[in-house]
Image (cartoon, rainbow, N blue to C red):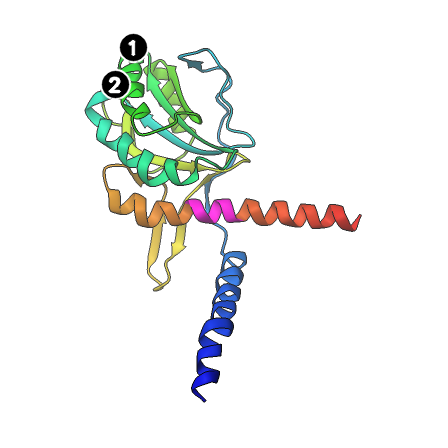
Amino acid sequence: MKKNIVLFILFILPIVAYLFFASGINSFAKLPTITKNIPELNDWKTLDDKPVALTNKITILGFIGQDVLKHKGNFFNLYEKIFDRNKNFKDFQMVMILPDGTQNQVEELQKDLLKLGTQAGWNFVFGSPEQIQSYYSQLQLIGKLDTSIGTPNVFIVDKNRNLRGRKGHDQKGKPEYKEGYNTKLVSELYNEMTDDVKIILAEYRLALKRNHNATRQI
């Protein structure tokens, strides 16, 4: 009897656990869409004049405002809790929108971020306050930019330029709405945003798997 129990624990239980978690990933509910088809960023300026596009990328989009270095801790939180976990996904990127005149502050920030690791996948784009306000308004969000043309919240944008978040009811049946994730709150990034990014990545891995299987069948 004891031998059977040991065999069950060593061989059967891990297989059952694997099947449970594997099926859980495939049965994830899609993360709700908050705003469909937000505008592209093709005409925005970057520090190195390279084009930045949202289409066909999973993007963490941020609006930093004029006091870049004042919010340096927010960047560290975002880097460690979100970017560092997903940087090896080739279609994952960070896009931070800032007012013109903050370029020197961004260069200083980049030096500090280099101490954490790679900056490949990080993009800083610049525009006038009027451009930024106009772009942000097209996201159709409840939250507003502050007087520095920024917000501590960052947003998840999928490959089709849909802004995704939480809308409806949580697991306990309570009404829930989340359009952005507060970079000041490590707990919010670690718990809620990490989970939501996982769902987006799982959606695309499943789509790639389905497309691959369909191609093989053809």
Q: Kindly state the secondary structure of the residue where label 1 is placed.
A: loop
Residue 147 in view (yes/no): yes
Q: Which residues are magenta?
A: 197-202
Please tell me in which quadrant of the rendered image residue 208 appears. top right
Q: What's the amino acid at mark 1? A: Gly
How far from the left and from the top, in percent, is residue 170? 36, 58
Q: What's the amino acid at mark 2? A: Gln
* Location of mark 1 (residue): 101
- Seen in the picture, residue 2 relative to 216 is either above or below; the reply is below
Please tell me in which quadrant of the rendered image residue 146 appears. top left
Q: Nearer the viewer, residue 133 or 163?
A: 163
- Residue positioned 50% across, 44% down in the render: 201
Q: Locate the N terminus and report the quarter of the image it occupies.
A: bottom left
- Seen in the picture, residue 112 relative to 4 is either above or below; the reply is above
- Residue farthest along the bottom direction in this orientation: 1
How far from the left and from the top, in percent, is residue 125? 40, 18
Q: Mark number for residue 58?
A: none
How far from the left and from the top, in percent, is residue 43? 49, 15
* Location of mark 2 (residue): 66
